[in-house]
């Protein structure tokens, strides 16, 4: 069992700030996913927790004990990297046993730990093989096995699936979910740039951007109630559409006149003081539905992409808005070059001012 607390954690290299003001409470047994664009500091934050990178500001506490200056081996943590870096001349059993041998554990203890890890990861048939005789997914499981034998309180994963092909990535992702279920009391922190991994694995997601945390929440909180435009557009694919507009009626529901001429109604409440407020109306492609009545957006379909289960509709940009994308269930290739009106249910219409959601004022 291990709780982690990050208070005002910062990282700089000389004068260059990489991360600052990171505040985060992680409860024992959570699977926390750090997600964010390349270079936003995900690995740096993970490596600071592991002790592989110095914390240049703030404090890291694990189970109430400050860890800033505790060496990595004494933090009760094991880390699994993207490059699994197995010892090529050692069998699966020897690879998994290695850290325990170095720690001078008894042969019985080592064998028990290796058997336990092999059972959890279904590696028992491969214990006497060399890494070169394993698939990529099996190798990554051995790398995870090397962490399990050490029985850490906290597991850290840094993009462990990035080297696997698409099908293996899905299979190994499900194995990691099962691994977490087999060890419900263990805390796991998982770094990825893949939002599907984040949405499917996380108990809570931490979105990192602009040197800090953009939002922390359950996957569905982030999807349904993004705090800002960054999270709104980072979670979900294709990204949420943002359309410029002005608030023309306020109350329990809010009406916005869009720059493109349409009207949007949102269940986000506003007050009279918001009349005339310049906002961005956010609507996910999957929440847009064709309508013959008053539309939120009307435009000509430039391109259609029929993916089988859904069709993506790409509309021409209007004014200074970005191109709007719609996502309709089924196959609609015939809509190309047609003019289509789209609306959205009021509870699916998000409102942002100055980049922040009006829900969180
Ligand atoms: P991510 O894992 O999110 O892709 P990283 O944590 O690897 O990002 O890197 C975050 C930022 O820190 C990047 O802009 C990177 O250039 C910078 N950085 C990482 N290591 C160093 C270093 N040793 N010296 C200076 N800058 C670094
Ligand atoms: Mg990284």
Image (cartoon, rainbow, N blue to C red):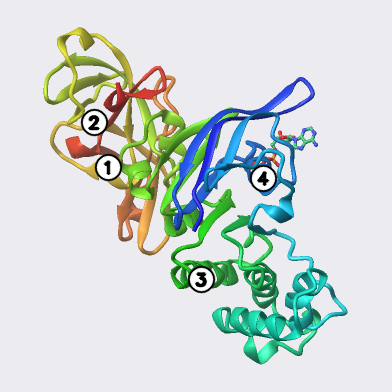
Of mark 2 and mark 1, the one earlier in the sequence is 1
The span from disc 2 to disc 4 (Cα, nearest Å) is 41 Å
Q: Which mark is residue 179?
A: 3
- Which residue is labeled 4 in the image? 43
The span from disc 2 to disc 1 (Cα, nearest Å) is 9 Å
Callout 4 secondary element? helix
The span from disc 1 to disc 4 (Cα, nearest Å) is 36 Å
The span from disc 3 to disc 1 (Cα, nearest Å) is 37 Å
Q: Position of residue 37 (x, y in %)?
A: 59, 40
For discs 2 and 4, the disc positioned in front in the rendered view: 4
Q: Quadrant of residue 139?
A: bottom right
Callout 2 secondary element? loop
Q: Do the residues labelled 2 and 1 touch (CB within 8 Å)?
A: yes
The span from disc 3 to disc 2 (Cα, nearest Å) is 45 Å
Of mark 1 and mark 4, the one earlier in the sequence is 4
Q: Which residue lies furthest to the right in this view?
A: 89
Q: Is residue 243 above or below residue 81?
A: above
- Which residue is labeled 2 in the image? 296
For mark 4, does the 10 Å Cα neighbourhood hold few (<14), some (14 to 19), or many (20 or more) residues? many
Q: Residue 268 carries which label?
A: none
Of mark 4 and mark 3, the one earlier in the sequence is 4
Q: Quadrant of residue 113?
A: bottom right
Task: Report if the beta carbon of the residue with label 3 is closer than 8 angstroms to ligand 2.
Answer: no
- Which residue is labeled 1 in the image? 288
For discs 3 and 2, the disc positioned in front in the rendered view: 3
Q: Is residue 293 above or below residue 21?
A: below
Q: Where is residue 212 in the image (x, y as percent from the top left)?
A: 55, 30
Which image quarter has ligand 1?
top right
Of mark 2 and mark 4, the one earlier in the sequence is 4
């Amino acid at each position: 069992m291990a709780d982690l607390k990050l208070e005002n954690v910062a990282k700089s290299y000389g004068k260059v700030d990489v991360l600052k003001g990171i505040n985060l409470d992680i409860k024992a047994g959570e699977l926390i996913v750090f997600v964010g664009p390349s270079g936003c500091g995900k690995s740096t934050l993970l490596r600071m927790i592991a002790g592989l990178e110095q914390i240049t500001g703030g404090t890291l506490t694990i189970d109430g004990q400050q860890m800033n200056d505790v060496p990595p081996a004494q933090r009760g943590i094991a880390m699994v990297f993207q490059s699994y870096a197995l010892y090529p001349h050692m069998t699966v059993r020897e690879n998994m046993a290695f850290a325990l041998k170095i720690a001078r554990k008894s042969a019985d203890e080592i064998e028990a730990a290796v058997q336990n890890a092999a059972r959890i990861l279904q590696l028992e048939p491969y214990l006497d093989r060399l890494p070169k005789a394993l698939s990529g997914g099996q190798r990554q499981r051995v790398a995870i096995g090397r962490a399990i034998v050490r029985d850490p309180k906290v597991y850290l994963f840094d993009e462990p699936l990035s080297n696997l092909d698409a099908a293996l990535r899905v299979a190994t992702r499900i194995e990691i979910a099962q691994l977490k279920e087999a060890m419900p009391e263990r805390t796991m922190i998982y770094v990825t740039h893949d939002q599907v991994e984040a949405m499917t694995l996380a108990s809570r997601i931490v979105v990192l951007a602009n040197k800090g945390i953009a939002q922390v929440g359950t996957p569905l909180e982030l999807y349904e109630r993004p705090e800002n435009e960054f999270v709104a557009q980072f979670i979900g694919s294709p990204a949420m559409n943002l359309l410029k507009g002005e608030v023309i009626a306020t109350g329990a529901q809010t009406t916005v006149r869009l720059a493109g001429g349409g009207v949007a109604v949102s269940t986000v409440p506003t007050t009279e003081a918001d009349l005339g407020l310049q906002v961005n109306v956010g609507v996910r492609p999957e929440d847009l539905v064709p309508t013959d009545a008053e539309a939120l957006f009307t435009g000509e379909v430039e391109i259609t992409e029929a993916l089988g289960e859904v069709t993506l509709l790409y509309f021409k940009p209007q004014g200074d808005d970005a191109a709007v994308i719609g996502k309709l269930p089924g196959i609609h290739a015939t809509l190309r070059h047609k003019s289509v009106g789209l609306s959205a249910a009021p509870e699916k219409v998000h409102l942002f001012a100055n980049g922040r959601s009006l829900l969180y004022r």
